[in-house]
Image (cartoon, rainbow, N blue to C red):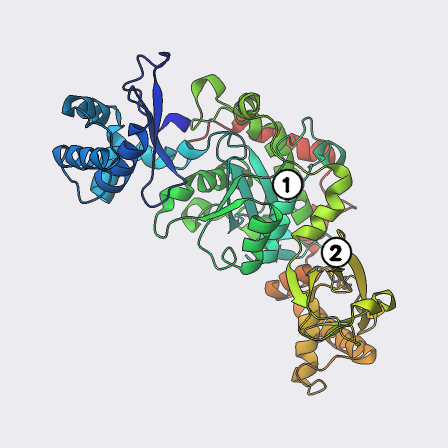
Amino acid sequence: MGDEGLISNAGTGYKFRNDNKTLIINHPKHPEMILDQIQIRLSDEYIPIIKEVIESDYLTLHRKSKAKIIDLINIKCSMNGVPPIKSETMYKIFERISPKVVERMRFGTKSINKYEEVNRGFANNEALYPLHLVEIDHTRMDIEVIDEKNGAITGRPWITLGIDVYSRMVWCMYISFEPPSANRVRKAIQQGALFKNTKEQYGTFNDWEIFGIPHNIQFDNGPEFHNLAIKRLVNETLKSNIRFRPIATPRYGGTIERLIGTFNTQVLHNLQGTTKSNIFHKGEYDSSENALLTIGNIREILTKYITDIYHFQKHTGLPLDCNSPMARFHEGLKKSGLPDFIETEDEELFKISLLPTLYKPYTRDGVRIDNRIYKDNSLSHLIDKREVKYRVKYDIDDISYIYIKPPNEDNFVRVNIVNPPYETVQGMNAYTYKLLLKYLRDKGELRRNKIATDEQILQAKAALQKDIEKMYKTNRKMRQQLDRMEWDVEVTKTNINQKEKVNKDNKLTYEQLMANAVKIFNESSDEN
C-alpha cells in the first residue's frame, strides 16, 4: 500500500483547479503525524476552523454526529466573523476524508482487524521525503558467532538498525555484544549520519548511498532511548526531532521490525550458526556446533547484502512506480534535494559533538569525572569557583581523555587524564575501568571515590586476566564481556573442530562471502 496508505483519492477530480486548497488533517494527539489530506474550494479563513474541529471533535472516540460537527464549525465561523458553511458543502468534505482514517480514529482498536493494511502503512504515511523520518530499534541476532582468534563460541551479538521510512533504505547499522544502551544508540546514529565508504572498506559493488541528518527519529520505549544523553544528541547536536512509539502500539514501529525480519529470513537464517527464529524452526540443527562466522564476517555479509541486494529489491511497502528502496530514495531526492550532511573535513568535530555532555568546574586539580582527573597546564586560566562550569565531552570508549569547551571559543580542547596516569588507561573503555575498580573494591584495596594508583590498576588487570582465562573456556558470558572490554587476552583454542572450520586468517575469503551473497540473492523472494 505504501505511502498512500491513508491518503484518500476522493475529492481529487478537480485537483488542478486554481481555486483548490489543501486541507491537511493531523492526528489529534500527535500533531506531527499526517492522517490525510483533502482538496476543498473554500476561502483561506475557513481552513483552520474546519481543520481544528475535525481533529479535535470529529476524529475522536466520542463519535459526535456530523450535524453536531457542522454546528461547531459554524459557531467558530460566527466567532471569527465569517459566514457559516452550507451543510451540503461540509457533508462533501466529510466524504473526502479516508474512511479508514475515520473508522480508525472514531472506533479505535475495533477497526484494526477490518483495516489490517492500515497498520502496515500507518507510520509510512507521514514520511514525505528521504530522511523525513527514521525508525531505530535493536534486537539480538539469530546467529551464533565465534571468536576471531581462537574459534570459541562467543554467542549471539546485538544489532541496531535504522530505516528511512520514506524509501525503506537502511540508514544505519551497528553490531556488537554491547547490550542496548545510550552509547550503542550514539554509535548507530554516527554510522548513519556519516559517509559509509563501503566500496573502500568491504569492496561492495555499490555505495551505501543514504547518509545525513534525519528530520525526525523515532525510537521504541526502551530506557536507553529515554536517556538524557540521547535526547541531547538528537535535539541539540543533530537539531532533529525525537519521537517515541506509543506504548502498546506495535503498528507504529512495524517498518523497522519488518526490516529485522527480512534480515533474518533472507540472510541470517541461511548462514552457518543460525539459531533460526525459534526452536521449532531450528529442529535438530546445532547452532553452536555449526558456528563458523565471526562478528566481523557478519558485519561484512550484511553490509554487502544491504548495499548490493536489499536496496535494489522490490519492496511491497513501496509504490509500484518506485518499488525498490534505491528507486524510491532517488525519486524522493528529486523533490526534496539532499538532506543536511556532514562534510568529510568536519567529521572529527561532528564525532566530538555526538559524545555525551557533562558540565564540570575546572579547579586547581583539573576536571574530575567519577574517580578520574583530567588536567592540562595550558588551561590554568579556566580555574575558577566550583559554581563556574564548562561544557565537557567524554568518550565512553576511551577514558584516557576528555574535551572541554572554553568560553567564547568555537572548538573543544582535548585534555588528557593525569590520574590514573595516561599510559595506564590509554584506549581503555569505561566498562573495563568500572570492572577494575569493582575488583579493587571487592578486594578491599580501594575506598569509594578514591582514585586508583598506577600500581593498583596493573595488579587488578593481572588478576582479572587470570579470572578471564580460567572462565573463558566454559563461560560464554565471559567471552562477550571480553569483547565489550576490547581487551586482548591470549587464550588457547577451546574446540579442535572449530580450528578445522576457519582458515588461517580466521576469516571468510572475499570469494566465500560473495558466494554467500549470490546464494542469498538467488534464493530470496520479495519481502512478505
Frontmost residue, 152 versus 51 = 51
> Which image quarter holds the N terminus?
top left
Frontmost residue, 454 versus 338 = 338
Question: Tag on residue 193?
Answer: 1
In percent of the image, x 53 and y 39: which residue is there? 215
Q: In the rendering, at what x and y percent does residue 185 appear?
A: 58, 52
Q: Is residue 338 left or right of residue 345?
A: left
Q: Is residue 37 left or right of residue 399?
A: left
Question: Tag on residue 408?
Answer: 2
Q: Is residue 6 visible?
A: no
* Residue at the outermost bottom position: 444
> Which image quarter holds the C terminus?
top left
Frontmost residue, 431 versus 202 = 431
Q: In the rendering, at what x and y percent does residue 245 appear?
A: 41, 48
Q: In the rendering, at what x and y percent does residue 290 appear?
A: 59, 48
Q: Secondary structure at mark 2?
A: loop
Q: In the rendering, at what x and y percent does residue 391 appear?
A: 69, 61
Considering only vertical position in the picture, is 245 above or below 524? below
Q: Are the two marked residues, 1 and 2, in contact with CB atoms closer than 8 angstroms?
A: no
Q: In front: mark 1 or mark 2?
A: 2
For residue 377, which quarter of the picture?
bottom right
Q: How many marks?
A: 2
For residue 488, which quarter of the picture?
bottom right
Q: Is residue 438 visible?
A: yes
Q: Amino acid at mark 2?
A: Asn
Q: Earlier in the sequence, mark 1 or mark 2?
A: 1
Q: Amino acid at mark 1?
A: Ala
| Crowd band around label 2 with a 10 angstrom C-alpha radius: few (<14), some (14–19), many (20+) | few
Cα–Cα gap, marks 1 and 2? 28 Å
Considering only vertical position in the picture, is 384 above or below 17? below
